[in-house]
Image (cartoon, coloured by chain):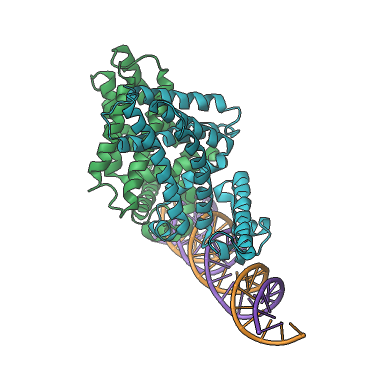
Chain colours: A green, B cyan, C purple, D orange
Amino acid sequence: MEKKLTRKEREKLARREAIIDAALEIVSEKGFEGLTMDELAERAEVGKGTLYLYFKSKTSIYLALCERGSALLNQQMAKVITKNLPGIKIVEELGQTYLEFIQRQPVYFTAFSYYENIIDQDVIEESEIAAQCEENAEQAMTYIVRALQIGMQDNSIKDEFDPKVLGLIIWGASKGVMHIAFLKHEKHRMKVLDEVDVSLKSLINGFIKLIGSGMRK
Amino acid sequence: MEKKLTRKEREKLARREAIIDAALEIVSEKGFEGLTMDELAERAEVGKGTLYLYFKSKTSIYLALCERGSALLNQQMAKVITKNLPGIKIVEELGQTYLEFIQRQPVYFTAFSYYENIIDQDVIEESEIAAQCEENAEQAMTYIVRALQIGMQDNSIKDEFDPKVLGLIIWGASKGVMHIAFLKHEKHRMKVLDEVDVSLKSLINGFIKLIGSGMRK
DNA sequence: TTCAAATTTTGACTGTTAGTCATATATGGA
DNA sequence: TCCATATATGACTAACAGTCAAAATTTGAA
């Protein structure tokens, strides 16, 4: 009873995933503003009312995208954290992982940005999904902090910072640099991340180098 | 004819400013999502149609907030850049200036974030106001780059980075750290920036220290 | 197999809000 | 004063998120 889901439960879950898939498709094509519940219903091949059986609101759907994205990213980061490397290297590889993830699936970057810009307290506090997003974000932070601690232990990273504060700074700064890189190239004919790759990568690499030499012992 | 505006022109300009004032008021109280054109018309004491004589769309009004904010911030930054200090100090003071500006008028931080998240090419490219925002942002970047160049000249900053790339990195990273600090405290009972001040300031200061030791010679 | 209760799905409907436009009002020169 | 031009208005339209009574489907007891 604890592990096997009934057929019904599995079907419900699958339907939910199908809706998220459709939403990702639309957002990839038309951006966040471009998603309407009517079109989503059509693409997911359900009635509009059905959407509201699976998600409380349009915002909840956006949150679900964010949740899926952050779970995927965490999977990738988890692989890095177990490697047997100096702490500073792990931090750098985490950065690389993030970059590659975003390049491969830029739609999730948009989803994360959306999430971070919701100020609406009520939505965040009352939503199951938002809670999961928070948890995923916390997990990601834990990976960074862990890597920093390893680095302080093995002397590859200065120990004059509190690792948690440093983690927060690195997290925020990475997001910001990524965001700028993203914009810079979306604005002038948005091929987004393919040909642009060089410049984005060099920006991020410059950032890693800067931060790296700031915290390296 | 080139400097003196007619009474009519002055009145038109004043009306425009009054609309922006009203918009700032509403956004401060209810956030960006909370602004409706009907309420704005009421607060600005004009008919709804009048709003559209002064602004092409709701988005244009948001852009106008951003434009005003960035102009104000640039004024503050301009003061710093003329000081006779080592380059690295100027960079740090620019950071402080930004922090203080946001603390004093957090609504503009929201406006900047809004601006940075508009992906809608068409709006940005066809808008007079957006062009002005771009120009202001570029001006701000110029201040940072200038400070970095001064620092490289006076040997207070490593010259292994391209100052423009470094400027972009610093700009993006600052925004990101600021954003995180902002959220961190808006989420858990949003007194935003008053009592929270300590933690926000310590975060930003940690960031300045980190970046500083990364680029200091 | 049959059928009625329970569950799930549906799309027509409602309310809200951005944006429009025909009409009304104000201005200023003759 | 009168007219032409410029400015302002709010009732109206269109688009969209979200609701809910009715329809369709599933279940399981007889």
Residue A174 screen position, x and y as percent:
36, 33
Front-lying residue, B118 or B97: B97
Query: What residue is drawn where x is 50% and y is 36%?
Result: B79
User: Whole-percent x and y of residue B196?
Assistant: 57, 28
Choose top left, top right, bottom left or bottom right for residue A86: top left
> Residue B151's x, y, as percent?
35, 28
Which residue is depicted at the point 35% across and 17% down?
Answer: A149
Q: Quadrant of residue A204?
A: top left
State which quarter of the image contains the N terminus of chain A: top left
Residue drawn at x 38%, y 24% as measured from the top left: B212
* Residue A76 in sight from this viewpoint: no
The correct choice, above or below, for B28 with respect to B36 in the image is: above
- The correct choice, above or below, for B112 with respect to B44 in the image is above
Left or right: where B28 falls relative to B81: right
A160 or A88, which is in the foreground? Answer: A160
Location of the C terminus of chain A by quadrant is top left
Q: From the top left corner, tell me how far across and down residue A130 is, in percent.
A: 47, 39
Residue A113 vertical position relative to residue B90 in the rendered view, above or below: below
Q: Nearer the viewer, residue B98 or A107?
A: B98
